[in-house]
Each structure stands twice: as structure tokens, then as C-alpha cells.
Amino acid sequence: MRLRILFILILALAVTAVSCSLKNEEKKIVTVTIQPQKYFAEKIAGDRFEINCIVPVGSNPEAYDPSPSHLVHLGKSVAYFKIGYIGFELAWMDKLIQNNPNMKIYDNSKGISYLEGTHMHADTPNDMHDDIDPHIWSSPKMAYKIAENMYEAFVELDPAHKKEYTRNYENLVSEISKVESEITARLLPVQGTMFAIYHPSLSYLAADYKLQQLSIETNGKEPSALYMKKAIDIARKNNVKVIFIQKEFDMKQAKTFASEIGAKIVVIDPLNYHWGEELIHIADALGKE
């Protein structure tokens, strides 16, 4: 009986020691720029890495200044996953590297051709605007490449667990494929139609599904009265029924535009962590025109 009790005590102490050891073993940190990246990275990494997103929910990645707490996590990161051409990265990447010179940098946009001139402006209705659009995650077709780039990065960072990352990556690809199928079913009947949007963040979705995107914002600024009049004329001519706006932008301008053309306003969040659900929400709004 005493031996049994002694054995149970030793076993309990061993379990406690292992548990404490696991708790004290901190996960390696990988930092990403935006929430959709965090979603993909967590799907592939599983429990192997802690994923730190430097631009918090509700912030604009075009003009965000990182907080001290995010910089602390960044200083501990073994790698940074860039999304490619977004304002935050253009302004801060050199400083982030200086903050942690040993951190590996991976570009999740590697192999993707950026779109230029993918949203129509009222000032040049017969031409397309020539800004580079960084919103590559706004289409499932681009998401495949983002996921592939992430997978290769995790395997390079931790080759010992390649099988696990491969399995997780394949599951993510299957998920992206389902999102793509659902979006295709919704958007196929409305190919060729035009939608309006305050900030032009759906260029890749429009290009991949043969839609036209009319931008209300002009060069990152609120539209002038003259610009709004031209945009309204184009929208009426093309029978625009939907105007998308992100919640952080001026709803007043969108309401004015919508009332003039008889369109519905749909609030969207292209930076939503739940990337697939958000794209289906957007496709639903377009498919119900």
C-alpha cells in the first residue's frame, strides 16, 4: 500500500514537472502585418508558433504607427511576414528590421503580379487609375499564393515539423477552395457589372471575377463636389446598385452617393480576421443586385 502511494506521489510530481517545463517553454513568435495574414498563419502553424499581428483590429494599415507593446513582440520575433506593398510596411519596414536585425523577412506576395489601374475614377472615366493596389488578399485566387508562401516560410523556420505544416497547409488550401467555389457561384451571374466602393480595396476580386470597381475616394482623399457629381453620373450610367464602405471611412459621403443613385450601402471589413466569411459576405451583396 505504501509503495502504491509512493508511486502515485512520484508520478504526480513528474507530471507537474513536465507541465511546468512546457509552460516555461515559450513559443517562437512570427509577426504579420494584418489580420487576414494572422488567420492564414495560425491555420498553417497550428500550435508551433505564436502569431503576432502588428496592426490591431480597427486600425488603418496604410497609416498605422506601431504601439510599444507590438514593438516588444516584434523584438522577440524570429520572422516577419510582409503582405507586400501596404503603407505601413513601406513606412516602417526599415525601422522594424533595425529593431530586430536577426529577424528573417518573408514576403507573402512573392510571385503575385500587382494590379495597377484596377479601379475607375470619375476624373478619368474611360481610363483606370494607375496606383498599385496592395489588397492582394481580397480574392481567393491570390490567397492560394499567400498561403503557399507562408507554408514555405514555416517549413524553412522549422523543418523538423514539415509534415504537420504540410497537413495544415493542405487543409487551408481546401478551405480557400470552398470559399472560391461559393464566391464563383454568387458572382458568375453578375459578371460585367459595376459596383461602387469608397476606398478601392476590392480590385483583385473585381479583376478575377470580371467586375468593375468605381472608386469614390480619390488619391486617398475625400472626393470633391465635382468629383462626386462625375462619379454619380458614371454610377447611374452603369446601373450601380451597391456601394461598399469600410466602417472607418466617412459614412456621410457614402449616404449622399447612395441616395443619388438609388443604391444600397454595404459596410465591409476587408481586414477581417475571418477572411473567407467576409469575402462571402461581399459576394452575397453583389450577387443580390
Image: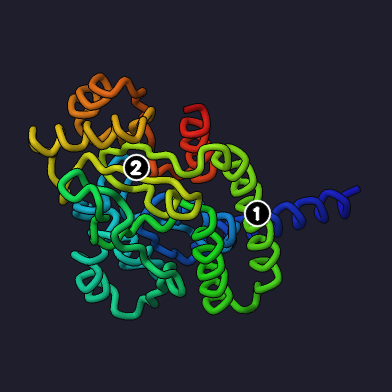
In-front residue for pair 133/193: 193
In-front residue for pair 122/196: 122
Q: In the figure, 278 relative to 15: above or below?
A: above
> Is residue 101 at all visible to an observer of this figure?
yes
Q: Residue 237 at x, y = what percent?
A: 30, 33
User: Which residue appears at 34% of the width and 35% of the height?
Assistant: 238
The kind of residue on which mark 1 rests is Thr
Quarter of the image holding residue 16?
bottom right
| Residue designated by label 1 | 16
| Residue designated by label 2 | 57
Q: Residue furthest left?
A: 225
In-front residue for pair 127/19: 127
User: Which residue appears at 19% of the width and 50% of the height?
Assistant: 124
Q: Residue 143 at x, y = what percent?
A: 51, 58
Q: Is residue 184 left or right of residue 59?
A: right
The kind of residue on which mark 2 rests is Val
